[in-house]
Amino acid sequence: MDAEMEDAETRAEIEWDGGGGGADAVLALAAGGASVSLCYHQAFGPHDDLVLLEAADDLLPDLLQGRVTIRGRPDEEAVLCTPSATYSMKFVGTSNSVFLIPPGEPSAPCLRPDNTSGDANAADAVAAAIKLAPGNIELVRTAPRLDKLRSLLRERPYILDEDLGDGFQHKKGLYTWQDLCKLIQASDGELLDGLNTLSAVEIDGFWRTVDATSMNTILDMILHNSVLHDWPLNAVPENDVLSVMESDGFAHKIVTHCLNRFGTKVEQEGRSFWSLDEKCVCLQFARRVLGAGKMKLANFMDKWERSVPSGMRVDLQMLEGEVLCDKLGAETWVHAFSVADLPLTPAERFAALFRERLKWEWKDLQLYIRDLRVPGVSSEGLLIKYTRRTQPSSEAEPIFTAR
Amino acid sequence: MEIRVRCGCGDSSCPEWAVVELQGAVQPQASFSGDIRGLHIGRLCSAPSPSSSKGGYTFTVGYHELAGTKVTLKKPLLVLRKKKLTGGAADQETPTAAEVELEVIGVIRHKILFKDRPKALISKPPTKEKAAVQPAAN
């Protein structure tokens, strides 16, 4: 920047009302030899409070109707969020002189360098530049940054019969929707999806995950009551189960949350029923069986089969992305390894996967990367970037190792 | 933290700004000692002889003339203005982002781009104009 302009910066900026530029005169310049006299605005200056944001046409309605926010903490790179998508913001500078000409009637005539105005151009329309734009902000669609959401919600999961302390004085580890909007770099839609993926529930205004033991207790009580009251597991009457559970001391909200997590609601003849999902329920029992650590596969299958509610059938395929089987000598061992516990960013995800196993076969690996979504990058692209693929022979299954 | 992007003008009536872009920098003579506010920069003309199908423009700065065209931006630029919200937080030592919001005050859909080097107007007799364009050497 010129020395002169730096001088101008040090001087106090003149209050500017946002107009006085005569942009219309420039925009209306058409064929026919018309001309406009361009000058520096009376309030010309650096105007650092003015920023240019490049926005594709499909983003304009959200921006112009106030549905956009910028999210991030001071130590994070800011992202721009529409109701449904997240964009990273990148400043792109220019070495050109970009004169910005605001709208409105020009407030003062141009001052000629020689202080004369007796020129043929004196009758020209006037346009005034308010600042030189140093560049603009570009937006690039990006994945929501939800890793932090998981760690925040794990600070203080909901526990049955918990005591939150006197009058909610101790809100540490508890987050409202507004808190999360400030802390998580994701659009509202993506944040809500993230909360659903984590099976979080809003309790007394705070978004919580439910502690696994508490969830097991509630599920057990629902199953127990179903046996007691002869409710079929694919048609548990909603009113009945809620009132029975309530008399046992379980809040409506948390029971409904549990039913939602392990089943789907069906309406029949004006009544609501819950159909418990075999896979979801069996998976929960598998986690419980494996909670103590790795087991021999046969041993595990036997224990798992005996633990699930009668009428439900276990199948090892239900545990895709939840457990890993390893052959040690003649024995096959199984241990819990859930995709839900792995990082959400590709680099960290692959690092975690290769810490678990040095070599992955495709059939196993794909279960642990199929949920990764990076705008503009295919899963093939992710594999090329983060793995090395080897195939001993053309018939053999490809093996993936760390790059 | 969260910074809201507001727009007071609504969808259809967002005022359009104009942009004149040229390579290098316009340098006022040193005699203005940095106070260039209100100073004339140059004269912008729609080309009198529209030989090309697209209407051309000329920009005359001192003894130099630039030729350019009007370009429609592939993606519009929004002009945002940072606003500090005045709320009873004046006693805080540093203003937090919660007190800042961005307001959309305009939209830019076109620019008049002068991407060529200037041509000297040698046929014109010298006048007393002092401003001169000095393109950067890129």
Image: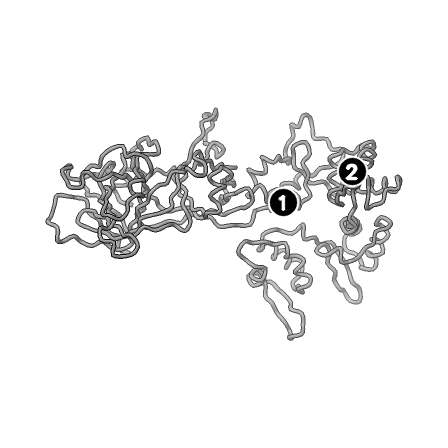
* Residue at the spot of label 2: A270
Which of A149/A21 is in front? A21
Q: Quadrant of residue A268?
A: top right
Residue A219 disc label: none
x then y, percent, for residue A284: 77, 48
Give A334 or A43, whichever is nearer the viewer. A43
Q: Residue flagged by tag 1: what amino acid is it?
A: Asp
Residue at the (22%, 38%) spot, across then down: B39
Look at mark 1 in the image and give the residue it sits on. A193
Question: Disc 2 marks which amino acid?
Answer: Gly
Which chain letter matches label 2? Answer: A
Residue A246, x across and y down, in percent: 80, 32
Instruction: Indicate which label's residue lies in the foreground, 1 or 2.
Output: 2
Left or right for A50, reference B131: right
Coloring scheme used: one colour
Which tag, 1 or 2, sits closer to the chain's start? 1
